[in-house]
Image (spheres, rainbow, N blue to C red):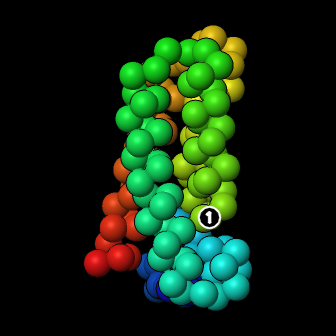
Amino acid sequence: MGVAAFRIEGGQRGGEPGLRVEKASPVDLVHLARQTMGDRALEKELLALFERQAAQIAERLRQAEAGPEAADLAHKLKGSARAVGAAAVAAAAEHYEHGARAGVLGQTEAERLGAAVAEARDFISALMA
């Protein structure tokens, strides 16, 4: 499971040397391995827990209105995401949290969070298969 979040490869562009930077993985498995001290069983357990929790919180947030309850849910998701290395989920949850606390939660924050959660869950599901 020790896959880096970013992979940089040498490449050719029009005959000239270049770099191709691939998109970051939805879960930084190197970070996760550090958090679990390389315990693969614990990594799988944490990813499964995160996947379930993220799905539950994302569903509740889809129906939530701006306010303290929505902000608290987003805060919880942000912490879980940071723990497993799901940086995009953590960033989207943080934006959602700030919007909810300010009472100005927009559709963009909800969509961004939903997309980040879906991408992380798809990645975890594929990893566990």
- Quick check: 125 above or below 36? above
Q: Residue drawn 50% across and 58% down? A: 50
**Residue 3: image x %, image y %?**
54, 83
Count the numbered circles shown.
1
- Indicate the secondary structure of the residue bearing disc 1: loop
The answer to whether residue 92 is above or below residue 120 is: above
Question: As rendered, which of 115 and 72 lies closer to the eye?
Answer: 72
x 56%, y 24%: residue = 70
Examine the rendered structure and indicate whether residue 6 appears above or below residue 67: below
Q: Residue at x 49, y 72 (%)?
A: 45
Residue 104 spot, x, y in % from top left: 60, 12
The answer to which quarter of the image holds residue 115 is: top left
Residue 17 location, quadrant: bottom right
Q: Tell me, yes or no, if residue 31 can be seen here.
A: yes
Is residue 89 depicted above or below 92 in this figure? below
Residue extending farthest left: 129
Q: Please state the horizontal and vertical placement of residue 69, each as a whole percent of the image.
A: 59, 22
The residue under the point 70% across, 80% down is 34
The C terminus: image quadrant? bottom left
Residue 6 appears in the figure: no
Q: Amino acid at mark 1?
A: Gly
Location of residue 101 in the rendering, given as x and y in whole percent from the top left corner: 68, 19
Residue at which label 1 appears: 85
Q: Quadrant of residue 67?
A: top right
Left or right placement of residue 16 versus residue 126 in this view: right
Q: Nearer the viewer, residue 91 or 54?
A: 54
Q: Residues within 10 Å of mark 1 (few under 14, many from 20)?
A: many
Q: As rendered, which of 95 and 9 lies closer to the eye?
A: 95
